[in-house]
Image: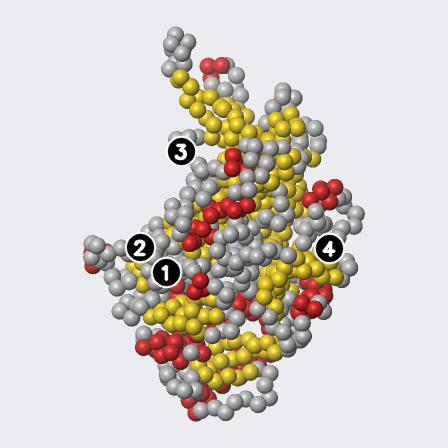
């Protein structure tokens, strides 16, 4: 192991005339005048070295050689694109994932909503760089987002397979320190600069923003000295780039980020070993260290013991437990779903379009259901996805008050998606989809196995009825419930989110979010709760010696463009009220009745869920009726959820005002897709769902969008240490008078002759 007095290699990138170079940085931990030396991979003249730097550069030579070989590969188009691929909040040496890599270089779009292909992203970049906005070759730029600019909704709904369709890209860029929104017409080869109005905030960070921000502190001698004085070897330091929200004018007119660090000595789970109280404020554009705050010198770094969660580590320490036998769903006839043209999925009576998205993760579009009685394919939902995630931590102290993350708008929920692990993330019968994204330099890269699709059966029942013996009718009718699951998982640094879209044969859609991963913990001077003074607030729970799990919330706001049997829909609140009977009317004193109210304007549809004021929430098509006269519709069925309790004037809540209600309904507007606004980073909250809804626009019998927020309060407990068991919650979109009768009435029961016979192995 390198001594703490030896220089430490770090990776950095620089761009000269828009050409990216790999830069390796040898940083000395001691405070001296020349505290940083640089070695550029492409340089023909390495710098002069001091004797104590030789070991550092010997290591760098080996790493550089490997880096150059990788950079020459056709699969990795640029250094910048390669840096984008790991999609982490920190730079670490990561083992290669065991995933299948598909060649997407020849992909062509087959549907108007198909994501941009590798060829299209390359063409977008070429067109952009010839535009005057990007100035001369020396003008610094970054492409924060390159995504499909979707055709108008009317066009998509009337399009038929085989017909041509336009291809445009929506681009968010930073050029010379200014933000731009551009539309690139791939058919015409032209670029249009869009007017997005005057709003605060900056675009979603690129992966390059995140990685280079974590390197910046190591070029500052003060930081290196602070680390060594805290007893940490610089080679063991892992850092996270943390978005800082917005708390006043001091943070305006500069793209800022805060960096906090951990010790990875003796564990891969460095999150459990914070260097508490040490915060570095960095300018993301200049990479300048603006401020270093160290208010935790009296707080020890927690021990590494019992923090490693890897199975290989458990095996080596004889701590594995085989509680269950292996289980798998076998489908000898293959799956019941088909994937056509790469993104179109057909299963049971469902048809839907699925694609990966850098910001939202996974987008479900054109969800339609074939009516079992009429044979008509009917619209249910035009588009659905996770629009924003708000994660505020409940600690007002200096090193924690700003931790109020917007994981989609600041970090990119899809950018943080990791390749799914076959057999563990998804069962044996799953099929996988890749994501194709653009790095900060505009070059494409592939996120393999980002989405999986599979059929799930866990012994659930679709419907059943058995007759009591007293009727004399020996009837027992049961139908199994099999669902189609579309899954993605994002690892936003320590936290893992599992997002499932479940489609049932009876027309129900269940949206489920699972939380797992590792807590963001706080170092503490206390090893036992009895050591804490009664008047001191820990802001969380002691989980282990010197480890506090801080209380926090998770809010996931979903965009749900419901088109129930057509575009013109209405929102109906069905209040369930107690009705008292008149004297002498009945032996009963009270009963419940349903009182329906159609929302006329947006404010009528702002909903806070209340346990003792129950209601149903329907999206109906008032222009379509069932045989007996009921308007066709779908309803939102809330499960366990949570509401934000923060003060409405608290800066984080102003930015996350879209969580003030659990439901909102707005008229469809193609520019209103992100609940926290287009530019979220350091935004002040003036371009959010809550602001749009204040316009109080008409929504009756209109093309409307429903927004639903799924919430979690998380008070950590010891069972969350060192990695959390998954906790889940969900909501349903359920047919309500959409069908004339039970749509799975004709589904057959399971029969022994149709099921595979699985035998245990001889060794079992």
At x 36%, y 66%, the residue is 274
SS assignment at label 2: loop
The answer to whether residue 117 shows anywhere in this view is no
Pointer 3 residue: 611
Q: Which of marks 2 and 1 is nearer the N terminus?
A: 1
Pointer 2 residue: 539
Q: Earlier in the sequence, mark 1 or mark 3?
A: 1
SS assignment at label 3: loop
Asked if marks 3 and 2 touch (Cβ < 8 Å), the reply is: no
Pointer 1 residue: 400
Mark 1–mark 4 distance (CA, rounded to whole Å): 44 Å
Q: Is residue 553 above or below residue 481?
A: below
SS assignment at label 4: loop
Residue 683 image offset from top left, x and y in percent: 50, 57
Label of residue 167 in the image: 4
Quarter location, residue 157: top right
Q: In this view, does 734 lie above or below 531?
A: above
Quarter location, residue 404: bottom left
Q: In which quarter of the image is the N terminus?
A: bottom left
Residue 165 image offset from top left, x and y in percent: 76, 50
């Amino acid at each position: 192991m390198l001594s703490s007095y030896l220089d430490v290699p770090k990776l950095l990138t620089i761009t000269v005339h828009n050409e990216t170079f790999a830069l390796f940085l040898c940083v000395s931990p001691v405070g001296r005048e020349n505290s940083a030396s640089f070695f550029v991979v492409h340089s023909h003249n390495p710098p002069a070295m001091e004797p104590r730097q030789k070991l550092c550069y010997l290591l760098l030579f080996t790493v550089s050689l490997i880096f150059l070989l990788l950079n020459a590969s056709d699969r990795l188009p640029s250094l910048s694109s390669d840096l984008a691929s790991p999609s982490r909040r920190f730079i670490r040496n990561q083992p290669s994932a065991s995933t299948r890599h598909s060649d997407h270089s020849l992909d062509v779009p087959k549907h108007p909503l198909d994501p941009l292909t590798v060829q299209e992203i390359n063409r977008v970049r070429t067109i952009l760089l010839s535009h005057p906005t990007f100035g001369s070759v020396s003008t610094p730029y970054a492409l924060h987002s390159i995504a499909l600019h979707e055709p108008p909704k009317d066009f998509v709904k009337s399009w038929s397979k085989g017909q041509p369709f336009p291809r445009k890209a929506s681009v968010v860029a930073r050029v010379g320190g200014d933000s731009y929104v551009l539309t690139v017409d791939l058919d015409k080869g032209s670029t249009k600069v869009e007017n997005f109005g005057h709003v605060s905030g900056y675009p979603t960070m690129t992966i390059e923003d995140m990685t280079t921000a974590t390197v910046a502190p190591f070029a500052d001698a003060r930081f290196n000295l602070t680390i060594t004085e805290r007893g940490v070897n610089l080679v063991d330091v892992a850092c996270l780039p943390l978005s800082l929200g917005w708390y006043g004018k001091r943070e305006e007119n500069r793209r800022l980020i805060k960096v906090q660090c951990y010790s990875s000595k003796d564990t891969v789970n460095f999150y459990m070993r914070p260097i508490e109280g040490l915060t570095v404020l960095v300018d993301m554009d200049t990479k300048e260290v603006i401020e270093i705050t160290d208010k935790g010198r009296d707080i020890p770094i927690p021990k590494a013991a019992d923090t490693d969660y890897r199975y290989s580590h458990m095996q080596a320490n004889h701590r594995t437990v085989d509680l269950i036998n292996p289980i798998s769903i076998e489908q000898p006839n293959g799956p019941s779903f088909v994937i056509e043209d790469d993104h179109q999925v057909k299963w049971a009576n469902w048809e839907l379009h699925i694609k990966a998205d850098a910001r939202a993760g996974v987008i479900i579009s054109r969800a339609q259901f074939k009516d079992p009685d009429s044979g008509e394919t009917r619209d249910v939902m035009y588009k659905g996805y996770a629009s924003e995630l708000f994660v505020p931590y409940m600690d007002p102290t200096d090193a924690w008050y700003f931790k109020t993350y917007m994981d989609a708008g600041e970090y990119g929920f899809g950018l943080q998606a990791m390749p799914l692990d076959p057999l563990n993330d998804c069962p044996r019968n799953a099929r996988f989809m890749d994501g194709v994204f653009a790095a900060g330099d505009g070059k494409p890269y592939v996120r393999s196995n980002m989405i999986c699709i599979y059929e799930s059966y866990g012994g659930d029942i679709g419907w059943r009825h058995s007759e009591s013996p007293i009727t004399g009718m020996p009837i027992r009718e049961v139908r199994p419930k099999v669902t189609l699951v579309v899954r993605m998982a994002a690892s936003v640094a320590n936290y893992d989110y599992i997002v499932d879209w479940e489609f049932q044969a009876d027309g129900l859609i269940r949206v489920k979010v699972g939380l797992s991963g590792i807590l963001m913990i706080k170092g503490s001077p206390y090893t036992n709760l009895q050591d804490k003074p009664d008047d001191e607030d820990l802001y969380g729970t002691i989980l282990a010696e010197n480890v506090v799990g801080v209380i926090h919330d998770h809010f996931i706001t979903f965009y749900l463009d419901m088109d129930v049997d057509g575009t013109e829909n209405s929102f109906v609140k069905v209040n369930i009220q107690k009705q008292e009977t008149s004297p002498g009317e009945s032996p009963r004193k009270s009963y419940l009745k349903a009182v329906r109210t159609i929302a006329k304007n947006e404010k009528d549809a702002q909903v806070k869920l209340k346990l003792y004021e129950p209601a149903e929430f329907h999206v109906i098509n008032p222009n379509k009726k069932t045989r007996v006269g009921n308007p066709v519709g779908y309803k939102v069925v809330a499960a366990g959820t949570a509401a934000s309790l923060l003060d409405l004037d608290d800066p984080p809540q102003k930015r996350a005002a879209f969580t003030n209600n659990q439901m909102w309904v707005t008229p469809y507007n193609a520019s209103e897709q992100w609940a926290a606004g287009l530019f979220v980073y350091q935004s002040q909250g003036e371009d959010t769902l809550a602001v749009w809804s204040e316009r109080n626009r008409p929504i009756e019998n209109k093309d409307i969008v429903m927004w639903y927020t799924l919430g979690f309060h998380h008070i950590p407990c010891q069972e969350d240490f060192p990695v959390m068991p998954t906790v889940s919650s969900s909501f349903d979109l359920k047919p309500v008078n959409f069908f004339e009768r039970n749509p799975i009435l004709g589904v057959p029961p399971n029969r022994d002759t149709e099921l595979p016979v699985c035998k245990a192995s001889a060794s079992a």
